[in-house]
Each structure stands twice: as structure tokens, then as C-alpha cells.
Image (spheres, grey):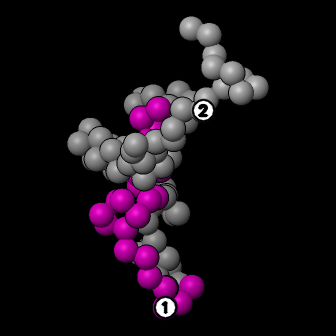
Amino acid sequence: MRNCPQGIHAFLRAYYHYKSVDWQENRPHKLQSWTASELAKLPTYYLMDLDKGMAETVAPHMPTKAEVAAYFGEAWKRYFPSPGPKPVTPVTGGQEPEE
């Protein structure tokens, strides 16, 4: 994985996107049984194709730049809401700080 063709950054972005709720084809459901035909319904991030490694498995699911930007924008708003914390004023013992 460290030496994958797309580079480790792109690999990790694709891997986590592929496993996330943001991946539009992600439709979790309970398997009816523990049989080969049911296991074949699992996404390939759980059960990879025989002829592919992890890097090849996630490469087709790389999010677009627009998807990354949209996710980042939403995450930024959620975790760093505006107007943000007020600046802390220094403790001056009751005196105005010198400028």
C-alpha cells in the first residue's frame, strides 16, 4: 500500500471514502445467510476480488475534487463554527496592559 501507484494519500482518501456513508453505493443490509452467494454481496472493501490488492480495489472509488471540497466544507462548518471563540484577554491584575 505504501508504494501503490496512486500514492498513499490518494489511496487513503479513496479507502476511507469507499467505506464511508458518503459513498453513494453504500447500502448496508443484513445478509440472509453465511453462504458464498450472500457473501458476494459484500462491498469489496470487506471481501476483495481475488486478483486485486487494496490499492486496486479502492482506486475506482476515489472521490472527485468536488466531493472532497464539499465534504471538507461541511466538516469545517461543523467542527469550526463561526464566529469562533472570542480572544482571551490577558490577566493584568486589574491594570490595563501597556501597548
Q: Is residue 45 positioned above or below 1 on the image?
A: below
Q: Residue furthest bottom?
A: 32
Which SS class for mark 1?
loop
* Residue at mark 1: 32
- Which tag is nearer the camera, tag 1 or tag 2? 2
Q: Is residue 69 left or right of residue 77?
A: left
Residue toward you, 27 or 77? 77
Residues drawn in magenta: 9-34
- Which part of the image, by quadrant, shows the N terminus? top right
- Residue 66: x and y in percent read 23, 42
How far is the residue under mark 1 from the one under mark 2? 57 Å
- Residue 48: x and y in percent read 49, 58
- Residue 82: x and y in percent read 39, 44
Q: Residues within 10 Å of mark 1 (few under 14, many from 20)?
A: few
Q: Is residue 64 left or right of residue 42?
A: left
Q: Residue furthest top?
A: 99
Which SS class for mark 2?
loop
Report if residue 89 lies within the magenta region.
no
Q: Which mark, residue 88?
A: 2
